[in-house]
Amino acid sequence: MSAMTVPRLTLNDGHSLPAIGLGTWPMDDDEARTAVAEAIRIGYRLIDTAAKYGNERGVGRGIAESGVPREEVLVTSKVRGNDQGYEETMRAFEDTRRALGLEYLDLYLIHWPLPRLEKYVETWKALVALREDGRVRSIGVSNFTAEHLDRVIGETGVTPAVNQIEMHPAFPQSQMRAADAERGVLTSSYTPLGRGRLLDAPAVVEAAGFHGVTPAQVVLRWHHQLGVIPVPKSADPERQRENFDIFRFALRAWEMDRITALEGSRYGGDPESHEEF
Ligand SMILES: NC(=O)c1ccc[n+]([C@@H]2O[C@H](COP(=O)([O-])OP(=O)(O)OC[C@H]3O[C@@H](n4cnc5c(N)ncnc54)[C@H](OP(=O)(O)O)[C@@H]3O)[C@@H](O)[C@H]2O)c1
């Protein structure tokens, strides 16, 4: 498996993203530096970080040390709650850019809607301005519901390219994926492995046995076949390699359905009430 053979998904702004990325939470700077450099050597070309993670400096170092030209690696970061608002976001973006050591960012997201704060529309306007002046290629959101999406689209006329949401077999997000798709928003999935807790489910283990792959590969392949971009986190090069190698087999329709039917719920916050600053 190489970077060249990874499919890409096209966004509503004409840009495209590789079909899998590397998550970097909860790595610190040192861990992120090593893990990101290693992942890029393995073939990852999409790296997910956020101001909130406190590791943008390490991510930037890892990219620089990977030996792969910067323009071949796509980098996502996110505006934290404390930095919501138009001017605040413009300033926060400059901090992010400096920490990463990059001229431009490939994808910049609003990390959480924080509806009680009532600032996500102003924040979105800042992202639109950053895209217009070329400092960011694509803009999107994270943890947005259909209502939050409709507000930013209605008030600015600009549809987010991506909505990054929690999703895994125990929380398959069928409605939210449909809501994203209806609006032309590409869904990206975080906590795609359910933090590693879903890997012993019989539906997953049996499919892994049949295809001669690992449970983690089955789960990540399930995301891919649902048309979303997972960003699994691993700091371990062997597991990074394993997670990346999901494009050589296909789950059968009934295997997909059986995995989607696993019982469970979200592990992270509810977008309507979660407050992360
Ligand atoms: N937008 C948001 O609000 C938001 C929220 C949460 C997360 N995220 C992003 O999504 C990324 C991934 O989510 P996550 O870290 O919550 O969960 P995850 O990717 O589902 O699971 C990560 C855990 O699974 C382990 N793991 C990874 N690959 C494995 C494999 N092949 N076999 C067995 N275990 C494996 C990792 O350990 P090792 O490192 O030891 O391999 C780690 O403990 C984060 O890093 C972050 O970038 C975004």
Image (cartoon, helix red, strand yellow):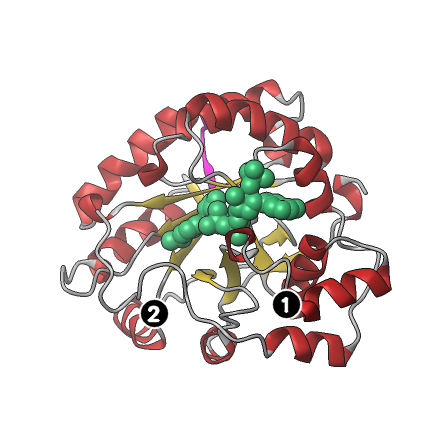
Q: Is residue 252 above or below residue 121?
A: below
- Determine whether, in the image, residue 63 is placed left or right of residue 180: right
Q: Residue at x 69, y 65 (%)?
A: 204
Q: Which residue is mark 1?
A: 227
> Which of marks 2 and 1 precedes in the sequence?
2
From the image, state whether disc 1 or disc 2 is nearer to you: 1
Mark 2 CB near ligand 1 (8 Å cut):
no
Q: Where does the image place residue 166, in percent across and percent down from the top left? A: 45, 61
Disc 1/disc 2 C-alpha distance (Å): 25 Å
SS under mark 1: loop
Q: Is residue 87 above or below residue 251?
A: above
Mark 1 CB near ligand 1 (8 Å cut):
no
Q: Where does the image place residue 163, in percent across and percent down from the top left? A: 44, 62
Q: Quadrant of the N terminus?
A: top right
Q: Looking at the rendering, which quadrant does residue 136 occupy?
A: top left
Q: Is residue 62 above or below residue 50?
A: above
Q: Identify the disc placed on residue 157.
A: 2
Q: Residues within 10 Å of mark 1 (few under 14, many from 20)?
A: some
Q: Residue at x 80, y 75 (%)?
A: 252
Q: Identify the disc placed on residue 2.
A: none
The magenta region covers 101-106
Kind of residue indicated by mark 1: Gly
Q: Looking at the rendering, which quadrant does residue 142 occupy?
A: bottom left
Q: Where does the image place residue 74, in percent across and percent down from the top left? A: 56, 40
Tell me how many marks there are.
2
Kind of residue indicated by mark 2: Gly
